[in-house]
Image: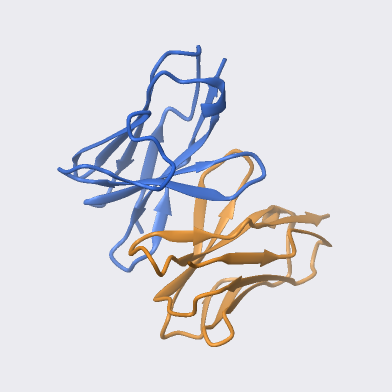
Amino acid sequence: KQEVTQIPAALSVPEGENLVLNCSFTDSAIYNLQWFRQDPGKGLTSLLLIQSSQREQTSGRLNASLDKSSGRSTLYIAASQPGDSATYLCAAPSTDSWGKLQFGAGTQVVVTP
Amino acid sequence: GAVVSQHPSRVICKSGTSVKIECRSLDFQATTMFWYRQFPKQSLMLMATSNEGSKATYEQGVEKDKFLINHASLTLSTLTVTSAHPEDSSFYICSVRGSTGELFFGEGSRLTVL
């Protein structure tokens, strides 16, 4: 059964610093991995989708890497801004049930001005 | 990507009543939609997979008679919480998988049962 872990659970940084969010998964037989952002009381916004054939994916200040062999993905956010404050979740496909995603508990990020 | 809309965003009801939540895929024909539930400070848990024109597939431990799912068209799935009780109070979110495999979520519906 796929298990997804995110470390740290919470992170507070001053504005301008780079953010590094970690996600690990137990079963490396995945076809993709997705990162999301969730603001309080809101739904999830898709940030990046990395296919299993890719090693990284970039969108603006966001860069996500994927290392299937070690069961890890990292989300980098460059030059953080107060507007980046949110909870970030990663999700990997469940390997025992097609189409089902297994979510990590998330990393709550606070960027202070 | 797909645009997903949920309604209502917030609902408060009395214990014992039923509540319907709608999930619409606005620009994508979705044969499958997913319903998640999220408790405060916790991650998302998949409740069921909604299949257009057929029965939903429920995850283990989810009561299908309690959480009725109907997926009557390629753009609409509904979740009805029947005879709601305070322990059903939660944040319910639906999602659609796009053509590339990317998952897109609605804005979520906050249910409070008094």
Chain ID for orange: A
The tint chain B carries is blue
Dividing the picture into quadrants, the one containing residue A25 is: bottom right
Question: Is B54 left or right of A51, judged from the image as shown?
Answer: left
Relative image position of residue B46 (x, y in whole percent): 44, 49
Q: Is residue B87 visible?
A: yes
Question: Is B23 left or right of B91, judged from the image as shown?
Answer: left
| Closer to us: A52 or A111 | A52
Query: Going 33% across and 29% down the picture, which residue do you hit?
Result: B65
Q: Is residue A22 above or below residue A28?
A: above
Relative image position of residue A1 (x, y in whole percent): 48, 67
Q: Is residue B94 above or below residue B101?
A: above
Query: Going 52% across and 83% down the picture, which residue do you hit?
Result: A68
Query: Going 49% across and 60% down the picture, which residue do you hit?
Result: A102
| Closer to us: A16 or A76 | A76
Question: Is A30 left or right of A43, judged from the image as shown?
Answer: left
Dividing the picture into quadrants, the one containing residue B93 is: top left
Relative image position of residue B102 (x, y in whole percent): 39, 64
